Amino acid sequence: MAVKSSRRRQRLQASATEQALLELNETLEARVLERTRALAEANLQLQREILERARAEEALRHGQKMEAVGQLTGGIAHDFNNMLTGIIASLDLMKRFIAAGRIGEVERFADAAVASAHRAAALTNRLLTFSRRQSLDRKPLDPNQLVNSLQTLFSSSKGAHIDLSLELGHNIWPVNTDTGQLESALLNLMINARDAMPEGGTLVIKTANQYLDARELSTLEAIDSGDYVMLQVSDTGTGMTPQVLAKAFDPFFTTKPVGQGTGLGLSMIYGFAQQSGGHVSISSQSGSGTCVRLYLPRYHSPEGKTQA
Ligand code: ADP
Ligand code: MG
């Protein structure tokens, strides 16, 4: 009898445990389901937020682009208008003088029209360089030789109040680039430096061989590690405020009076550096001068390679 009841107890206990396990199993399933639903909901919410942020960023980028395009078109239209006015007015005067039989006096108007047309052509050239559509007429050249030839040109136009000094490195590597574009870039930098030193000062042009490590450079545009020739133009002039510095490369950004600045010098240099596989950087402080560094990739001549 006692054996019977203890067996029954055991059976009862077993079924209770079974029941409890079953229940646990059921609620577990429900809990897992519940948790999965919550996670899915959170995930969906996250996805929505990511999408929303991407949309906001895209809108901001688009806004900035449109602003830049507006600035660009406005600037070009303004400049071209000035040049066309010069051409049209000169042609108009020529017509009137011819009608009045004063043929001998026509030439100066023709000259003025041609000068204006040339300025317009130079502007389109700079724009093409900036938009990187201008093909570079590359050839190997010695940077020091180019700087030397520019020195003669620049010395005559810089004015006595500015001291020009050259610090040309030894055994500077050759570069493979467009001579005309590089000349124009350096001249632009020299003129910027001159404009920044109305009271006088020192302009230094320096060349050096330099290895650039891409991992150490925090540039906006990607740059390859390797050997570069650095061409540096520095001045002891007015320098730039952080606000001016931030916009200095923008096309048509100028702080100079109308007729004196086009705001295309640095943007053209930027485009040229990009197209050459190089890099350009500016450091400047208000009141203590500016230093612009242009890096062009070292040229390895085919003969040099086979010898090495
Ligand atoms: P621009 O010379 O026609 O104004 P740039 O593109 O050459 O156009 O230069 C843009 C602006 O950057 C200048 O108007 C000036 O404010 C500033 N800047 C450029 N170079 C220098 C410099 N060496 N020192 C001080 N400011 C400079
Ligand atoms: Mg300039």
Image (tube, grey):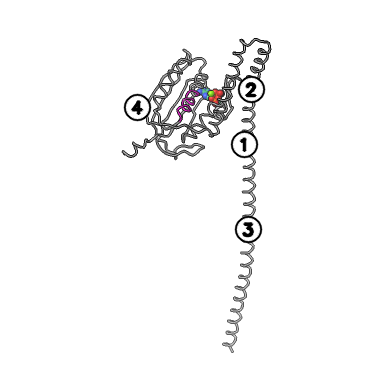
Q: Earlier in the sequence, mark 2 or mark 1?
A: 1
Residue that protrudes farthest toward the left in the picture: 307
* Residue, disc 3: 40
On the image, the x and y values in percent for residue 255 come to: 58, 23
Q: Earlier in the sequence, mark 1 or mark 3?
A: 3
Q: Earlier in the sequence, mark 3 or mark 4?
A: 3
* Residue, disc 2: 84
- Near mark 2 (Cα within 10 A), the count class, few <14, some 14-19 or many ≥20, is some
Residue 186 is covered by the magenta coloring: yes
The answer to whether any part of residue 239 appears in the image is no
**Closer to the observer: label 2 or label 3?**
2
Over which residues does the magenta segment extend? 178-188
On the image, the x and y values in percent for residue 104 come to: 61, 10
Q: Is 205 in front, or is 15?
A: 205
Residue at (59, 79) in percent of width and height: 14
Q: Secondary structure at mark 4?
A: loop
Q: Quadrant of ligand 1?
A: top right
- Please give the label number shown on residue 65: 1
Q: CA distance from mark 2 to mark 3?
A: 64 Å
- Please give the label number shown on residue 170: 4
